[in-house]
Image (cartoon, rainbow, N blue to C red):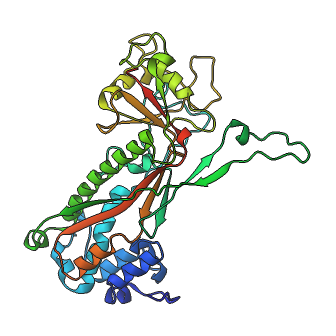
Amino acid sequence: MAETNMKSSPAELAERFGPNLYRAAAEKGMTLTAYLNRFENTDPNDKSGLDVFDRVLRHAGIVSNAVPEMGVWASEYGEFDRSPQTRAMAAEWMLRQWRKVSHGNHQRSLLQHTDNVPGSWARPYADAMSGRWDQMVAPAIPLAAVVAVTTPIDNDTYRAAYLTSDATQTRMVRVGEGAEIPRMKLVSSDRAINLYKYARVLEATYEQLRRRRLDYVSLIIQRMAVQTETDKVATVLDVMVNGDGSSGTPTTHDLTTLDAAASAGTLTLKGWLAFKMKFANPYLISGALMQEAVALQLALLNTGSANIPLISANLGNLGTSLTPINQFADAVRYGWTSDAPALKIVGFDPRFAIERVTEIGADISEIERFTTKQTQTLTMSEVEGYALMDVNAVEILDVNA
């Protein structure tokens, strides 16, 4: 579809809504929602706060969210079946519900130098990374919490790039006249990263769906997305532990080596702190994944007295007169999942560890079949792969060794 400098109104977009818009967005490497903003006629009098797609739905008479206190109810799903245009709108509406889970608002907490460390006696709580609200649907471990960067591509083959260096190459040292300047190399993989299709299909007859309100259908779609995000985190964990085939594998540290007094299988405070110190500059551990039993041991670590558990101790100062310069004492976000290796803690720096590669437009064929009534099933699919960008950003603690 030829690009135009003329922006269309919501009414004009509603008239020509169809697969061609999805293809045009995919060619630009954009979602349809982002692409539609190129055609928006800004109305200074519009105070609704709606984006272009929501304005198109409004023009089509489709209400996606209920406001019971005002007597406003979500439209029935059958409203999408009035015309080919509204049926095409249904596909993007479903994708938006999916993205609420897979690309939700996730961000790190910002601490000022005067703030007490979360979990200390002066601040015995951890701040939420993002807001929560009623009816929120989100995976227990968001994929965004373990991914450093997302790279969109327009095919199913990707060769990752890796930084290779050693301590002598990364230092800014004095260079003699005519001497070689130390350098860090960016090398491409000799092996393509595997991209996998993650998909969920909701099987339902048209009669079952058409009388359902959109907010109810939205909840079903978001629930489907949660399981897909869980599967993706399991894949990321496998890449962290075993590498992606080109990047190497992270170092594993035995608990009894870090703490000679420790017994295999029982996490100790000394072993945990020593493990955190294994993250050398510029890396720092700010995320850790493990199984539930190990997470419970971690949460119940104490400082020598059962009355002062680790989560209540002022480790930000490591006492009352010592303040570490190294940034390892910050609160570590830890998560438990059955997909983690047994009796191991996979620590990582989410800024450098994992690159997510996603294929733009991988769902175009499903959208076309749905729009042309070749199928009544709700199919949500994504094609993604993961690369370990920097093997030094991941360390593993073997609690059982």
Q: Quadrant of residue 166?
A: top right
**Residue at left offset 61%, top offset 48%:** 163
Farthest residue, direction right:
177
Tell me the quadrant of the picture where the N terminus can be found.
bottom left
Q: Position of residue 76 (x, y in %)?
A: 17, 72
**Residue at left offset 42%, top offset 42%:** 128
**Residue at left offset 33%, top offset 85%:** 17
Front-most of 221 and 44?
A: 221
Q: Position of residue 157 (x, y in %)?
A: 44, 64
Q: Is residue 103 left or right of residue 210?
A: right
Tell me the quadrant of the picture where the C terminus can be found.
top left
Q: Position of residue 374 (x, y in %)?
A: 18, 79
Q: Is residue 381 visible?
A: yes
Q: Is residue 76 left or right of residue 61?
A: left
Q: Quadrant of residue 300?
A: top left
Front-most of 38 and 148?
A: 148
**Residue at left offset 61%, top offset 53%:** 187
